[in-house]
Image: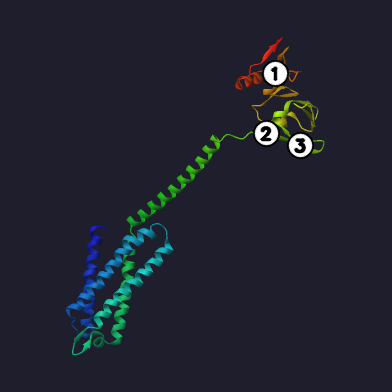
Amino acid sequence: MPRKRIILFLGILSFLMLVPTLMTSILSGLVLPWWACLLSVVNVLILAGMYLVERLWLIDHFLVRGRIWQFVLASLMLVVLGTAAQYVTVGIADRHSIGGGLTVADFLGKGLLISHRIIILILSALTVLFALAVALSDEWRLAAFKYREAERDKHALARERDALKGQVDSLQRPAAEPEYISVKVDLMMTQIRLDDILYVKSDGDYIVLHLADGRAPMVLMTLKALEKQIPFDRFCRIHRSYLVAIDKVQGLQGGKILVNGETLPLSDSCKPAFFELLSLKSIILSSSGQE
C-alpha cells in the first residue's frame, strides 16, 4: 500500500484501540483494567486482519476478476466471522470480575452491552467497506481494467490459435478421393467404380460410361457436371465430347489416343492440359505414327 494509506490505516487502528476505553469511561464512569484494554486491542487486531483480508485477498481475487457475487458473499462471511471473533473476546472481558463480586456485564447493564455489540457489528461492516473504498481508486480501476483486457486478449488469442490450428490440420490432412460416383442408370441410382471407367463419351443430353468390363451404361448428365464429381488428376478432357481416365491411356496412334484398343480423338485445344497431366503423373506413352 502507498505510504499515505499506511499512515491513515495506522491512525485509524490507534483510534479504534482507544474507543472501547473512552466509550466505557464516558458512558459509565468505569475505568477498565489492563486486561480489558488488552482484549480491546485484540478486537482492533481482528478488525485489522479483516481489513487486510478484504483489501489484499478478496478484492484482488474476486472483485478485480469480475466475480461480483462471490465477492459479496465472501465479504459478508468475513463480516460475520470478524464480528463473532470480537463477540468472543468481549464475552471474555464481560465475565471477569472488577471487584466486589461484580463483572463488567453486571456493571454496564444489559442496555450498554447490547449497544456495545451493535457497535462491534457496525465497526466490522465499516472495516470491510473502508477496505473497499480504499481499493476503489484510480490505481485499482486501472489494474482491474488492464486485467480484464489481458484476459479478453488471452481468450481471443486462444480462439484464433485453435481456429488456425484447425485450418492447418485440415490443409495437412490429405483429402480422401472418392472411389465411386453415383449416377442414375435406367431410372435407378447406381454406383460406378472410378477404376472401372475407361473413358466417357457425350451423346447429346446423355453421357456413355465405357467401363473395363465392356458395359456402356447411358446416364442423363453432361460431361461438365461429371467433371465436378471426379478427381481432376485422374480424368482429363481430350475432346469436346470425350473424357478419358489418364491411367487407362495406352499410347498415341496417328495423333489419337489409344484406350483399350480403341482410338479416341485428341483436339488441339485439349493437348496442353492432356500432356501436362501425363507429365505430372509420370506417364510415358508409346506412340505409333504420331503426327
**Left or right position of 277 against 45:** right
Disc 2 marks a residue whose amino acid type is Glu
State whether residue 133 appears in this view.
no
Q: Earlier in the sequence, mark 3 or mark 2?
A: 2
Which residue sits at x=33%, y=67%?
A: 128
Q: Which residue is mark 2?
A: 179
Q: Earlier in the sequence, mark 1 or mark 2?
A: 2
Dot 2: element: loop
Neighbourhood count class around disc 2 (C-alpha, 10 Å): few under 14, some 14–19, many 20 upward: few
| Alpha carbon distance from label 3 to label 2 | 13 Å
Query: Residue 26: x percent and y percent?
Result: 21, 82
Query: Residue 258: x percent and y percent?
Result: 73, 17
Q: How many marks?
A: 3
Which residue sits at x=22%, y=67%?
A: 11
Looking at this view, name the residue that lies furthest to the bottom.
100
Neighbourhood count class around disc 1 (C-alpha, 10 Å): few under 14, some 14–19, many 20 upward: some
Query: Residue 98: x percent and y percent?
Result: 19, 85
Looking at this view, name the residue that lies furthest to the front.
213
Disc 3 marks a residue whose amino acid type is Thr
| Alpha carbon distance from label 1 to label 2 | 22 Å
Q: Earlier in the sequence, mark 3 or mark 1?
A: 3
Q: Which residue is mark 1?
A: 250
CB atoms of marks 3 and 2 within 8 Å: no
Image quarter hosting the N terminus: bottom left
Disc 1 marks a residue whose amino acid type is Gln
**Left or right position of 227 against 114:** right
Q: Which mark is residue 124?
A: none
Neighbourhood count class around disc 3 (C-alpha, 10 Å): few under 14, some 14–19, many 20 upward: few
Q: For this rendering, which residue is in front, 45 or 253?
A: 253
| Alpha carbon distance from label 3 to label 1 | 28 Å
Query: Residue 240: x percent and y percent?
Result: 74, 23
Q: Which residue is mark 3?
A: 190
